[in-house]
Image (cartoon, rainbow, N blue to C red):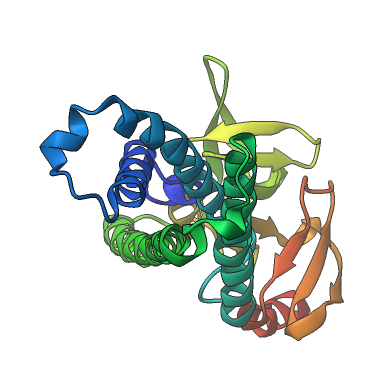
Amino acid sequence: MDVENRHQGYNDLYFRIIVALIAAHIIVSFGAKESLFQLLITPDYYQSLLPSAVIAFLLVCEVYLVTIRLDKHYDWKEDTAKRIGLQLSLALILPAITAFLLATIYFGLFGYNILNTYYLQFDFPVIVIMLILLNVYYLAFYFYRQWQLTESRLLNMASKEDEPKNKEVFVVQRGAKNIPLPVKTICYFYHDGDFNFVRTFEKEDFLITQALDEVQAQLHEKQFFRVNRQMLINFKACEHFEPLEFGKLELFVTPPAKEQVIISQKRAKAFKEWIAR
């Protein structure tokens, strides 16, 4: 699967499990006089480790799911200020609150008031540090994949130099069928989930195997415009557009897209010039 199609998720389940176990071990063993070997042969260690690991894994998954959602709607480069605010509030502060509430419930089950324990003094800071490191990890992972995508684009552009930019037919897929589809019948190319599709003016959707960057390199710039990372739009499919906050635009297309078509502030000027012909 190409780099672009991997943008919507992180294949790091084992990493999340390991992080949760390490965080749980640190919390359980903090201040213990026993060695690691002594802890590993003590049943009480595992009784404490299991609930801590479950809570830690839930928090890690919360950060993971929030990050994926934000990656889809708020790009780090195009919506920097808003992305920072949302990442801090939804992937750091909110999980920290979740951790406190889950720990409160856990201690309550055993008849303890969490405020009368050492949780806030010792355990909670470890959890906050874990959440900070997770956010740094996903931020670094994002820019690493952007570098991969740039490299992929350069390679694709180099390999397509001799191909005409007026491609007339794309071979699309529906089930086991490979169907030649004239470009003039396509209203837009779009990314959905882990795959790329085309939608025709007849409101039919077909799967394509090429990345949108490859597709863009084969189309005439006057006929198709890359409105965002998820969509290439045919001029004839543009119905109208409306201004949004922070200089963004919302494009209305026909036939309608599954989600809002948002054009970032950085692409808005180029789009207006393109649409005005």
Task: Judge whether 84 appears above or below 219 on screen.
Answer: below
Q: Quadrant of residue 82?
A: bottom right
**Relative to 66, is 210 on the left or the right?**
left
Q: Position of residue 115 (x, y in %)?
A: 60, 59
**Relative to 68, is 94 on the left or the right?**
right
Task: Judge whether 253 appears above or below 132 on screen.
Answer: above
Which residue is situated farthest in the top direction here? 176
Task: Judge whether 272 appears above or below 12 on screen.
Answer: below
Pick whichever, 107 or 265, lies toward us: 107
Is residue 191 at least partly visible in the picture? no
**Relative to 178, is 235 on the left or the right?**
right
Q: Position of residue 122 (x, y in %)?
A: 41, 62
Q: Quadrant of the C terminus?
A: bottom right
The residue depicted at 73 percent of the width and 40 percent of the height is: 200
The residue depicted at 14 percent of the width and 35 percent of the height is: 38
Q: Position of residue 192 (x, y in %)?
A: 61, 42
